[in-house]
Image (spheres, rainbow, N blue to C red):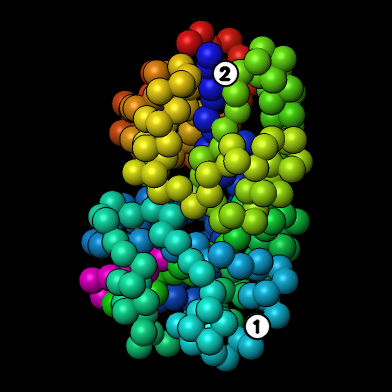
Amino acid sequence: MKAVVFDNSGTLIERFRALKDLKTGSIIEDMSSIDIVDNGVKRALVVLQTNPSKCIINARPDQTIYEFIKRNKIDFDISYSEDYIKKEEILEAIKEDKTMISDIQDSIRAVIDKKYNVQICSGSGLIVSLKKKKIEFTITAGGKIFKEVPEVIDELKKRRIEIFIASGDRKESLKELASFLNLPKENVFDTADSWKKMMIIKKLKNKYKVMMVGNSANDILALKEADVGVLTLQQKEKTPQKVYDAADVVVGNIKEILDVEF
């Protein structure tokens, strides 16, 4: 029995990401949130488990992000970090931070203006420095499904290969994607950081021969753990050498995985 595990952002969907640099106030469109986390000390990428286009965009803009989370009991998860960080540490780090909901709303508008769908990607979040005890960036990501993906999914189903998604993206966005691709919801693992992805692969290997398909540093452990690790470059972003080193196969288009034997 065989299984393919896909990352989402940059792998199944073409991702557009808007970050607001809170130091300069500028919107950045060409930087990787993973790289920003890696280039800092004890940083974490935090995903808010709420709908950006319905909840956050309509929230009172002059409240701090900490107030918004606490008052509305907003759940969140750590999507990526190099260190093991607890959720309680995030709340403690941003308790006195003055970053406003308006700063997240600015990143949401930047994504919507480009006509990307915030519902099939990670939605909105923060890059937090636990060392500095502050939010350094707000972030919103939207996506468009790569046009080859439905064909790839259909072909894998014909071959009786089980399909899973393990992604750092938020729960509701992945539910919508699973519905579009007609995948069982139980085959979708949301807000999966590097370690969780690796453990998902490890568990699946008890039943399947597993291919992992990903595109960035948060896929490294899963790529190494899988029987075959495939790096896809379809997102056309700069990819760190360490991701190449973790992969067994490199493809330029998601359709090419159909030719990879495992």
Q: Does label 1 or label 2 sit earlier along the sequence?
A: 1
> What residue appears at the point 40 percent right and 48 percent down from the top-left corner?
193
Badge 2 density bin: few <14, some 14–19, many ≥20, Cα 10 Å: many
Residue located beneath label 1 in the image: 59
* 34 falls in the magenta region: no
> What residue appears at the point 74 percent right and 29 percent down from the top-left corner?
150
Point out which mark residue 257 bears: 2
Position of 181 relative to 167 (above/below): above
Depth check: give the residue in front, 83 or 24: 83
Q: Is residue 217 left or right of residue 162?
A: left
**Res 10 visible:** no
* Residue 183: x %, y % from top left: 69, 35
**Res 207 visible:** yes
Question: For residue 27, which quarter of the picture?
Answer: bottom right
Q: Secondary structure at mark 2?
A: helix
Q: Residue furthest bottom?
A: 62
Position of 225 relative to 64 (above/below): above
* Residue 204: x %, y % from top left: 45, 28
Q: CA distance from mark 1 to mark 2?
A: 42 Å
Q: Is residue 155 left or right of residue 95?
A: right
Q: Is residue 170 left or right of residue 228?
A: right
* Residue stretch rendered in magenta on the structure: 127-132
Disc 2 residue type? Ile
Disc 1 residue type? Ala
* Residue 245: x %, y % from top left: 31, 26
